Amino acid sequence: MRHRILLLIAAATGLLACACGGTDAERLHRAAMREYLDPIRPGYEGRNPFWNTFATKFIYAPAFEFEPVENAVKYRFTVSHLGTSMVESPRYRKDAPTEDPEPRRVLGPGAPTGRSWSFEAESPQQSLAPVWNDIPAGRVRVTAEGLDAAGQVLGKAGEREFLRDFPFRPPYNGNVRPYAEAARMAALHIHELPAIRHWLTAAEPDMTYRHNTYACKIVGATIRLEVLVAKLLPSHREEALAIARNAARFLMEQSRPEGAPLAFFPPTYYSDLISSSRAENRGKTMTMEACAAGNAFLDLYDATGDRIYYDRALAIAETYSRLQHADGSFPIKVDFETGEPVNGCKAMLTPVMEYFGRLEDWYGVTRYRDCLARAAEWMHGNALESFDMTGQFEDMTVLGQQPYQNLTNCASAPYASWLLKKPGRTAAELADAVDLIRFSEDQFVCWDVLPDDDGVRTLCTPCVYEQYGYRVPVDNSTCVVANALLDLFEATGDRLAFAKAKALADNLTVVQNALDGLIPTSLDVREGAKNRIRGFWVNCTYASILTLLRMAELTGEAADFSAEVPPSR
């Protein structure tokens, strides 16, 4: 299998290497453009509702829920190009507190071009495929009008404005240093941070690194990253495991006691910094985040053989089995003491599905097989059939959330990966995974941007926005989308999927600080004070490191690496 994959990689990378001449790069571009004419799970198919009510950009030809016009026999669609100037806010809800940048220009200066494209169709919900590939990147307005038999306008069926975003068009910058070296540099950068080295002598976090307020996510990622350092860099093993042990001790001490509704769950929120200070988050926890701690404990058990970590990971799984609803679902957010849901929002279940799967696949624990099956059934029958890939971020509100209001690749891409790696995967599940990956690209990938008035492109492309609620490119989103594309490549040999994944992963080495190894969390250009308050998330760097290691392994670069390096998903 590995030999086959390396042959596929060699063919794909050879294709890309030749792309400098243009011919093969154009072949990849044309293949992408053909795919972009297929709308992604449009509501008119009946499989799911129209999911794009809150969407602001498209790479694939969209179709909208425009209403029929009485007595209309056909519809005229007109797409008007509004120019290449566009400003957007990183936040989608004005009621969401934020420390993030102000609205910024995402397309360069430009005036309306006066260009337009028209076609006629029988339905007001026809996709824009007939003219889609003729429309250059920029702001556009689509108007659908109902016509009578004589071609007279009877009324407007609907209208939308959005960004017709850049398509995939290689070549892009290749990796500027070997993937394995970039991964080691990034790992050492985290390992040497004062807030991380603080764990050498303390079992409480250094809160000068404010993101430690997200205990499960950040402290859990610290443990996992330090275990990885111990494996990759033997000279740092002793210190790395000491850091990991003290961080694990902290999570255990902060966990709910045995017998509590959330027994052995560490907290999502600790102290009162950033989002932990909000009234809606005090005394609450995000249900899926205990998986981050559980996986950290399993990593530490693998590295040390200390049974205390394995037992704690099993105890977390046991609580999940009790918390699961009869229909297989879990609430997205609950009271940390009582376990009562804060509202009716349901969690996206890929994290707990992967967790149950790891316990069985790695450790032979089969008693959660039914829990996994019910979770998988719920994901298919609810999340997939509604196509509401909603976000579950501890720093974003889940209160007053409308369906489809905060979609994210952090739900869709990992679920696609899970489907692609599922034993006995069916043809229908493969098709669902492809839909999820295309959705992740369509709504969140930025293949290019235009310069601003100063001639500067404000996004480090190619990159991936995190969610509707935070329209900022984040390295973790680069990773989840790249890994889903790599999973598709490994499952099918799809060279276009590999080319897209490589372009995204290579950019991690481009944005990495060549002097200290830092991979920034957010991949947008900021000036002065805005840059100085830029947040940095350990869990995101950990994801980048694993993705780079995966690329090193897939391309044959990492033949000397330990087989114990965990999979990047």
Image: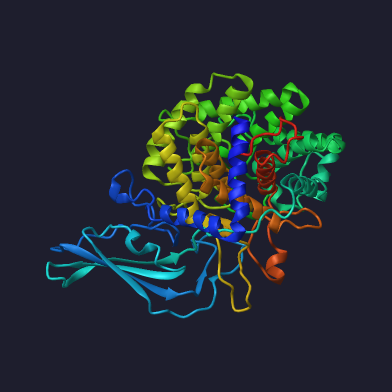
Image mark count: 0
Q: Is residue 316 left or right of residue 233?
A: left
Q: Is residue 536 or residue 76 the one in the foreground? A: 76
Q: Is residue 271 or residue 417 the one in the foreground? A: 417
Percent x, y for residue 201? 86, 40
Position above or below: 49 against 225: below
Name the quadrant of the C terminus. Answer: top right
Q: Is residue 253 or residue 279 the one in the foreground? A: 253
Residue at point 29% right, 47% down?
45
Name the quadrant of the N terminus. Answer: top right
Q: Is residue 126 left or right of residue 196?
A: left
Residue at point 55% right, 30% down?
261
Position above or below: 153 against 243: below
Position above or below: 431 against 154: above
Percent x, y for residue 54? 41, 58
Percent x, y for residue 403? 40, 50
Residue at point 66% right, 55% down?
174
Specify whether residue 290 is in view. no
Specify whether residue 502 is in view. yes
